[in-house]
Amino acid sequence: MDSVSIVAAARELFAARQYPGVVAACADALAELDARDRGAVALRLLAARSLLALRRDADAQAEIRACLQVEPQCGPAYRLLGELAARADELTSAKIFLREALRLAPDDDEAREWLTIVEHLGRPPAPPPRPRARADRPPPLPPRPARITALPQLQVGRRAHHAHAAAAEH
């Protein structure tokens, strides 16, 4: 089977979200292909995307590195590095990789979308809203009524009862 057919089959598996199958098919095909074959670069990119989907970031990075050794000007490889960096919360690195991806492949819409996301994530949060102007404030509440602070002295207990009873007799 030629590399074009292998890449097409791997793309079908990827479209069906059969990521482990993509990784296995690409590994088998890469074992048979010359590393400098153009199909090998496409297979490595597909394998890297599948590994990213499987959250196997270190393996994905190794595939991307191998891809860039063969084709140093590979825009999609830099996009994938940008995705990896964004996933690791390394936003400065992600911006650098994604800008390089767009420089090398200006029509890469995925790289453009990722760069927009990363730039948005890298912005500081919006400041809290400013207090309203005096004219926008509601009118002040009316003053509260005065509190009674002095209470009459009351006698409490048995003595008070006797004192009250004695006063009633007189």
Image: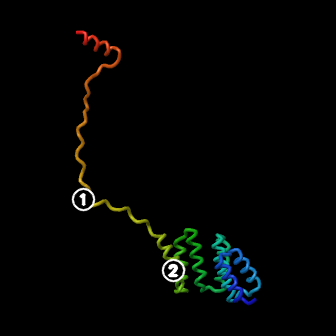
Q: Is residue 72 above or below residue 142?
A: below
Instruction: Decide: is 56 above or below 28.
Output: above
Identify the residue shown where x is 52% and y is 86%: 107
Q: Dot 1: few (<14), some (14–19), or many (≥20) neighbours within 10 Å?
A: few
Q: Which label belongs to residue 93? A: none
- Element assignment for label 2: helix
Q: Quadrant of residue 46?
A: bottom right
**Which of the 4 image quadrants contains residue 30?**
bottom right
Q: How many neighbours does mark 2 have within 10 angstroms: few (below 14), some (14-19), or many (20 or more)?
A: some
Quadrant of the rendering where the C terminus is positioned: top left
Residue, disc 1 = 134
Most foreground residue, 169 or 43? 169
Q: What is the spatial separation of the Cα atoms under label 2 and label 1, in whole angstroms?
A: 45 Å
The kind of residue on which mark 2 rests is Arg
- In which quadrant of the rendered view does residue 123 lie? bottom left
Q: In the rendered image, which residue does mark 2 sit on? A: 112
Frontmost residue, 10 versus 87: 10
- Residue at the spot x=38%, y=64% of the render? 127
Give the answer, above or below, for where 169 lies relative to 97: above
Residue 14: x %, y % from top left:
66, 79
Q: Is residue 64 visible?
A: no
